[in-house]
Amino acid sequence: MIDAAYASWALLSRDLRAVARSRSQLYSSLLFPLMLLALLGTGVSSGLAPTSPRILDGDYTSYLAPGMIAMTALFSSTFSSAGFYRDRESGLLRAMLASPHSAQTILFGKALGAILIGTIQALAVLVLAVMIPGIDLAWQFGWLGGVATVVVTILALNFMLSGLSLLLAVRIKTMQGFHLIMNLVLFPLFFLSGAFFPLDQVPTWLEAIGYMNPLTYAVDLLHYASYANSSNGLIGPLIDGLVLGGLAVLLFAVGLRRAPRAV
């Protein structure tokens, strides 16, 4: 048990060092959501003057902030999982799997790296958003409870995405194919999650698709914890937590069990 934990920690440390050396990845993961907040948020707030009751005082930039936190976790965690392909193509993954440790131990360590990277970068965007004067987050249950809820939500989201990445690795044999499929899947899911517009303001058929989207429950919980000043128009933390937590456990467990077949 101790040896397995040490092996997972060694793989986690290796992936964290690789990201720390890749400054372009670090800078882009922080600058892109901030750029969207500045350009898209300001443009919509000033140019379109949104009137939805979910967008408090027409301040679209503040409404957008929780969605940008989710987006950072989404893409950072998912693309960090691409290290699985680099190690497999170089032969390093096969060498690691030839060690006395089980395949699940090796893949668990690599998955933890993607989860932690996605979580750290998402929380960094949260800190920067809080520091921007034009962004007003309500923290309706206090900043301590709100931040704790945001952290748990981001972790659950990253576990779910890591499990999805492992499942796709069973079917997709190349890194290029992995990025193509993930973009094809993640962009529609993200746009239909309520990150860019309230789902209760769209046609019924589009709203129904949004509620079938697992990312919707992560974004809703982030809005509930940090941005909203009431629960009006939101799904609610109980349903959000049950759906997001259940999917995170299910996808991560199934992905960890099936991924060795892709090696």
Image: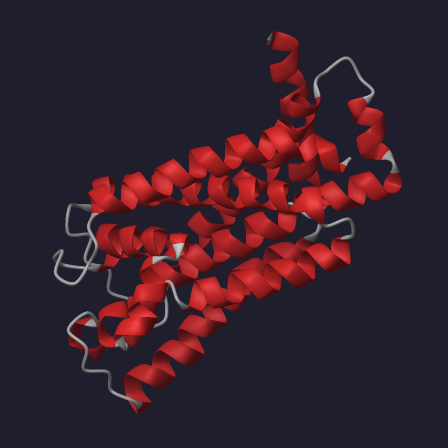
Total number of numbered discs in the rendering? 0
Left or right: 193 in relation to 117:
left
Tell me where residue 155 appears, x and y as whole percent. 43, 40
Left or right: 224 in relation to 189:
left
The answer to whether any part of residue 239 appears in the image is yes
Residue depicted at 27% across the width and 57% down the height: 223
Task: Give the camera-side residue of 186 and 15.
Answer: 186
Tell me where residue 154 appears, x and y as whole percent. 41, 45
Tell me where residue 238 appears, x and y as whole percent. 21, 42
Instruction: Indicate whether 63 appears above or below 220.
Output: below
The answer to whether any part of residue 112 appears in the image is no
Instruction: Indicate whether 133 appears above or below 4.
Output: below
Left or right: 184 in relation to 189:
right
Tell me where residue 219 appears, x and y as whole percent. 34, 56
- Name, please, the residue furthest toward the bottom: 47
Q: Quadrant of residue 206?
A: bottom left
Task: Give the camera-side residue of 7 and 245.
Answer: 245
Residue depicted at 64% across the width and 33% down the height: 258
Task: Give the camera-side residue of 47 and 256.
Answer: 256
- Name, please, the residue furthest toward the front: 205
Instruction: Indicate whether 9 appears above or below 204.
Output: above
Residue depicted at 60% across the width and 63% down the height: 183
Looking at the rendered image, the quarter that the C terminus falls into is top right
Q: Quadrant of residue 148?
A: top left
Left or right: 63 in relation to 142:
right
Colouring scheme, one of rainbow, by chain, secondary structure, one colour? secondary structure
